[in-house]
Amino acid sequence: MKNKEEKDYKPVSCNLYDRLEAFASLGQQVQMRYRSETGEELEQQVRIVDLETKDKQEFLITKSGLRLRLDQILSITEG
């Protein structure tokens, strides 16, 4: 049986995933708007260091240690 978090996960487009991989591999700082676990919209500059898949969900990990599910990203631009 899937837990609620896994069930609610919506895979992101291949295009977005490819962009995130490029930002991570280049060590590029990006401006990211995202929805927190509490539903609050947040915006900050981050440096993506890795992408991972766990329990059929995809996450990004920033240099500061933020671990964010990819479907919580609202927008991301070069920073």
Image: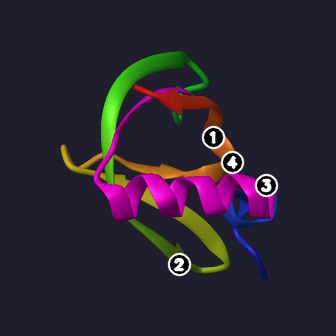
Where does label 3 land, which residue? 8
Residue at the location (53% across, 36% down)? 37
Q: Earlier in the sequence, mark 4 or mark 3?
A: 3
Residue at the location (60% across, 80% down)? 55
Q: CA distance from mark 4 to mark 3?
A: 10 Å
Q: Are dots 1 and 4 in contact, CB under 8 Å?
A: yes
Is 67 within the magenta? Answer: no
Question: Is residue 53 in sight in this rendering?
Answer: yes
Is residue 56 found left or right of 67 in the rendered image?
right
What residue span does the magenta drawing correspond to?
13-33
Is residue 16 found left or right of 41 in the rendered image?
right
Is 23 within the magenta? Answer: yes
Q: Nearer the viewer, residue 67 or 14?
A: 14
Residue at the location (61% across, 24% down)? 39
Where does label 1 land, which residue? 72
Q: Earlier in the sequence, mark 3 or mark 1?
A: 3
The mark closer to the camera, 3 or 1, is 1
The mark closer to the camera, 4 or 3, is 4
Residue at the location (70% across, 66% down)? 6
What's the amino acid at mark 4? Asp
Please identify the dominant SS of the magenta region: helix
Q: CA distance from mark 2 to mark 3?
A: 14 Å
What's the amino acid at mark 3? Asp
Where does label 4 land, which residue? 71
Q: Earlier in the sequence, mark 2 or mark 3?
A: 3
Where does label 2 land, which residue? 54
Is residue 37 found left or right of 73 in the rendered image?
left
Q: How many marks?
A: 4
The quarter of the picture where the N terminus appears is bottom right
Q: CA distance from mark 2 to mark 4?
A: 14 Å
Q: Residues within 10 Å of mark 4 (few under 14, many from 20)?
A: some
What's the amino acid at mark 1? Gln
